[in-house]
Image (cartoon, rainbow, N blue to C red):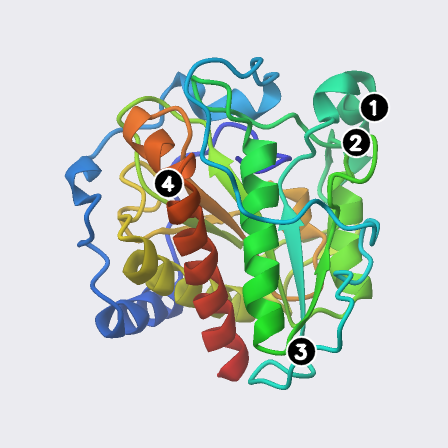
Amino acid sequence: MPYDDSPPPTRRARPLSVAAALAAVCLTAAGCGGGQEADGAGAAPPGPGADAASSTAPTPTGKQPEPSGTTSPSDSGAGADSGSAKPLPKGPLTGRTVVIDPGHNPRNRDHTREINEKVDIGTGRKECDTTGTSTDDGYAEARFTLDVSHRLRTLLEAEGARVRLTHDADRPFGPCIDERARIGNEAKADAVVSVHADGSAVGNRGFHVILPAGVKGGGADTSKIVKSSADLGARIAGHFVRTTGSAPSNYIGGNTGLDTRNDLGGLNLSTVPKVFVECGNMRDPKDAALLTSASWRQKAAQGLADGITSYLKG
């Protein structure tokens, strides 16, 4: 769930160019309506769990996710280089910079006062950050996003990309949503992807990619990134379908896997192409079974990496 999320507004219309781009990618992938998880594709409105990002994740109990197989967080610091000890290999993404933004911070729950402080998002003010959601068994979104982000970093670096994380659980809380945007901007990133999982009602299933709307006000001006971000998001959506087998969300985006929003500071304040990816719904048992699976998280990272690579290669 986006770290500066509020209950999603009524479904928004998508620009025709975005729909065309997604259709083109899906045709070469496996079709947006297919996949092994298509059994959840019914029309269901957002449920009361849609604002779960503002709640504190429960203490883990019951079934726990499989081991991640990833290394421990690096000492690179927020917004720093990814910490690779060896020179990056030459590859199709050599010379490109990608910023990965793991949604939330596992320590946010211990700093509620700090993360509740409001910051300027250009068109208003919102909380610095939130704790994120969790599965019913207590697997926190913040743990999920770090795990997928580490896997994604490894895949992109293997292609030659310079990868930076907005944080690596190496700070007490945050970073705040305005700082997350600033890290990508200052890195002059070719692409920024914010990794999340949603906290909606049971029966709401699938992934969706959140695109920046055209926003101009205060310190926000997305006019230069709307089109490129839509292209990035459509390519990620198409590849995510093919690689994970998950269907696009059945409750947001009209079964396209794409949703455009103007209320997220991380998008409003970005000056480089950026999207949020909600990889699934942690509150639905079927989606939760996927999100807590290490093998599925590897597929999710691969789908993200393939979409990013497709966008950067043009």
Please report whichever mark, 4 or 2, sits nearer to the chain's N-terminal start. 4
- Please, what secondary structure does the residue beneath circle 1 have? helix
| Amino acid type at image mark 3 | Arg
Image coords of residue 97 (percent x, y): 69, 72
Q: Residue at x 26, y 69 (%)?
A: 29
Quote the CA–CA distance across marks 3 and 2: 29 Å
User: In the visual, does 174 lie left or right of 155?
Assistant: right
Relative depth, front residue between 15 and 54: 54
Q: Return the residue at label 3.
A: 96
Residue matched to label 2: 173
Q: Which mark is residue 79?
A: none
Contact between marks 1 and 2 (CB within 8 A): the answer is yes
Q: Are marks 3 and 1 in contact (CB under 8 Å)?
A: no
Q: Residue at x 28, y 30 (%)?
A: 286
The CA span between labels 3 and 4 is: 34 Å
> Gap between marks 1 and 2, in whole Å?
8 Å
* Amino acid bearing label 1: Glu
The secondary structure type at the circle numbered 4 is loop
Which of the two discs, 1 and 4, labels the residue nearer the N terminus?
4
Q: Which residue is mark 4?
A: 11
Looking at numbered disc 2 in the image, what kind of residue is underneath it?
A: Phe
Q: Could you classify mark 3 by the number of other residues whose Cα lies within 10 Å: few (under 14), some (14-19), or many (20 or more)?
A: some
Provide residue 147's location: percent of width, then percent of height.
57, 44
Residue 5 visible in this rendered orientation of the protein: no
Residue 66 position by quadrant = top left
Residue at 37% over, 40% down: 11
The three-letter code of the residue at mark 4 reads Arg
For residue 19, above or below residue 96: above
Which residue is depicted at the point 75% across and 66% down? 84
User: What residue sits right under mark 1 in the picture?
Assistant: 114
Would residue 34 appear left or right of 208 to someone viewing this image?
left
